[in-house]
Structures are given as structure tokens and as C-alpha cells.
Image (tube, rainbow, N blue to C red):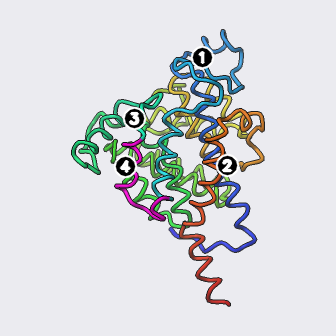
């Protein structure tokens, strides 16, 4: 599926929704880091309702600090922008540089895949039945921005970046679906279009069905996306969606990051509470804001617009 090039009248709104997607990811990560691995009853006992970026959590983070969800997304964005296009080896190099920097948190599957790249220059990890975690889906949003306007390109790149660390059909499918929902949200597709992407995934892989959600917010990618789908489609604002998700505990930072990316794309920048944006690490906020604009400008949607403008001069 390709989309017509965007005109000047629509470019500002698209850039703002793209920015909201990346900032929403970071906000969800920073919110969820506090309640990661907690049970809902423990969250209620300690915080009542957790709705403030306060840091802490099992990693004892300062307020506004993000984790691997945002940091690996930054790696993907940096690689694309450094090369001015897609280069899988450049993405792997950014991951390797990040891992060598002793990040505050890194999942075991991501660590293994990055180490295999460092030691073997391996750009696709072999299929593994244990790779159905959420570590690839959490970092796919920058791909959606870069591939804006071309869902076929988006699907290919979403899987390529995933297989640097995860090679499992459920991981692949989840990455494509999350990227597709971000893509559609940025383009202003109504909620029904985003739900169609989730339902298509559930139709192909019943593990993702979310109609009878039991509340399992684990790192298993089907549990993560069922949580995201349930709370995104049953709420009406960015804030309500994110608060509900991070108060479930479990793998709250990743569920929060994915939900933030999707909800940000759909609801837009104005819908993200200012108190959350202000509390976010300023360096992260600045980098993601600038990256969103640049990634969108590299996308097929905007390249097509520039070509069309050149023809009419």
C-alpha cells in the first residue's frame, strides 16, 4: 500500500503527529519504568494511581530517565539519519555502540543478538522459539516515520530491524503491526483503520486476540500487544490510555512505550500532557523532536511531494 505525496497544507500536521509518536514512546517508557515488574495491587498500595513521571522503580531511575525502549529507538533513528537512508549494518553498529556504553537496562534477547553482531557481524539472528519477546516491537516507531507513505517498505524494514535480535513469527508480525498503526495514525487514519491493523494481526495469529483480555502484561509480545490493543481501543485520550497501561505493572515500560508511540501518532502532540513532556529528560526530548522531523522528510511521502513540486515549477 502506497500513499499519495503530501501537500504543503498537510505537512505540518503530519510532522506534529510523527513528533508525538516518538515523544509518546519516551513518555510511556519513563512512566512505565516506575511500575515495571510490579503487581497492580502493589502499585495501588504505593502510589494510589501512578500518573506522574517520578522515576524510581526497580532500576531506581531519576525522574524523566528512559530505558532501553527509547534508547534502542534512538539508535534506529540515528542510524537512518546518519546514512540519509536505510542501512541495516548502521543500525546494528548503533546498537553495538549503545551496548558497549553499559545501558541502564537491556533485555537478554537483545543483548545476545547485539553480541552476535559484534562477534560475528551477524545481521540476522537464526530462528529461535524463545524470541517471541517484545524487544523488537518496542523500537520500531522510527521505521514507521522513515517509511511513511509506503506500507510495503515499512513491513520489510520493520522485520529487518527486528531480526537483528529477534527471529520469531510473532515478533515479526508484531513489529509490522505496530509500525503500521503508527504509520496510519500519523497519516490521520480514523481509529477504525488502526483497529483493522490489530484485528488483521489477531486473525493471522490468534495469540493476539484482545476481546477477552485477562490482564497479562508480560514481556511475551502477544501479552504486550494485547495489553496495548485493549487499553488503546477502550480509552479516548492519550493520558487515559497511558495511565491505564502503566498501572497494570508487569513489563510496564515496554507496554507504555508501544502504546505511547501508537497513541501519540493518533491523538497528536497537543494530547500529551505537558507535565509529562516537561518531566522528560531534556536531551531525549530534543533529540526525538528533531529526529521525527528529519525522518519524515526522508520518507517516500515527502520525497514524492518534492518530486511533484519540482515538476510544477
Residue 219 spot, x, y in % from top left: 44, 30
How many angstroms separate mark 2 from mark 1 (CA)?
27 Å
**Mark 1, secondary structure of its residue:** helix
| Magenta segment includes 276 | no
Residue drawn at the location 78% of the way across and 38% of the way down: 274
Residue drawn at the location 60% of the way across and 11% of the way down: 42
Looking at marks 4 and 3 on the same chain, the residue that comes earlier in the sequence is marked by 4
Which residue is tagged 1? 40
Q: Which label sits in the foreground, 4 or 3? A: 4
Q: Which label sits in the foreground, 2 or 1? A: 2
Which residue is tagged 4? 93
**Mark 3, secondary structure of its residue:** loop
How many angstroms separate mark 4 from mark 1 (CA)?
38 Å
In the displayed structure, would residue 189 be above or below residue 96? Answer: below
Number of marks present in the image shown: 4
**Mark 4, secondary structure of its residue:** helix
Q: Which label sits in the foreground, 2 or 3? A: 2
Residue 154 spot, x, y in % from top left: 47, 60
Looking at marks 2 and 3 on the same chain, the residue that comes earlier in the sequence is marked by 2
In the displayed structure, would residue 36 be above or below residue 263? Answer: above
Residue 260 spot, x, y in % from top left: 62, 40
What stretch of residues is rendered in magenta? 82-97
In the displayed structure, would residue 132 be above or below residue 200? Answer: above
How many angstroms separate mark 4 from mark 2 (CA)?
27 Å
Looking at marks 2 and 1 on the same chain, the residue that comes earlier in the sequence is marked by 2
Which residue is tagged 3? 133
Q: Quadrant of the C terminus?
A: bottom right
Amino acid at each position: 500500500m502506497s500513499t499519495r505525496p503530501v501537500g504543503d497544507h498537510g505537512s505540518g500536521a503530519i510532522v506534529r503527529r510523527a513528533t508525538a509518536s516518538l515523544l509518546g514512546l519516551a513518555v510511556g517508557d519513563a512512566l512505565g519504568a516506575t511500575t515495571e515488574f510490579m503487581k497492580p495491587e502493589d502499585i495501588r498500595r504505593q502510589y494510589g494511581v501512578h500518573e506522574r513521571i517520578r522515576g524510581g522503580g526497580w532500576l531506581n531511575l531519576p525522574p524523566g530517565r528512559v530505558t532501553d525502549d527509547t534508547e534502542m529507538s534512538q539508535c534506529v533513528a540515528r542510524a537512518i539519519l546518519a546514512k540519509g537512508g536505510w542501512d541495516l549494518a548502521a543500525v546494528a553498529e548503533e546498537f553495538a555502540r549503545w551496548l558497549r556504553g553499559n545501558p541502564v537496562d537491556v533485555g537478554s534477547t537483545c543483548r545476545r543478538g547485539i553480541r552476535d553482531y559484534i562477534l560475528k557481524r551477524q545481521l540476522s539472528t537464526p530462528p529461535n522459539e524463545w524470541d517471541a519477546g517484545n524487544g523488537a516491537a518496542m523500537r520500531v516507531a522510527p521505521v514507521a516515520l522513515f517509511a511513511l507513505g509506503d506500507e510495503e517498505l515499512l513491513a520489510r524494514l520493520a522485520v529487518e530491524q527486528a531480526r537483528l535480535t529477534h527471529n520469531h513469527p510473532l515478533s515479526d508480525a508484531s513489529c509490522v503491526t505496530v509500525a503500521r498503526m503508527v504509520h496510519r495514525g500519523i497519516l490521520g487514519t480514523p481509529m477504525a483503520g488502526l483497529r483493522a491493523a490489530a484485528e488483521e494481526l489477531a486473525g493471522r495469529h490468534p495469540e493476539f486476540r484482545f476481546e477477552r483480555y485477562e490482564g497479562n502484561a508480560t514481556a511475551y509480545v502477544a501479552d504486550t500487544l494485547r495489553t496495548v490493543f485493549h487499553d488503546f481501543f477502550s480509552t479516548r485520550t492519550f493520558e487515559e490510555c497511558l495511565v491505564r497501561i502503566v498501572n497494570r505493572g508487569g513489563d510496564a515500560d515496554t507496554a507504555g512505550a508501544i502504546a505511547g508511540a501508537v497513541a501519540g501518532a493518533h491523538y497528536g502532540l497537543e494530547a500529551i500532557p505537558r507535565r509529562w513532556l516537561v518531566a522528560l529528560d531534556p536531551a531525549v526530548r530534543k533529540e526525538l523532536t528533531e529526529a521525527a522531523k528529519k525522518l519524515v522528510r526522508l520518507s517516500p511521502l515527502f520525497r514524492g511531494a518534492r518530486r511533484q513540486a519540482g515538476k510544477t515549477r
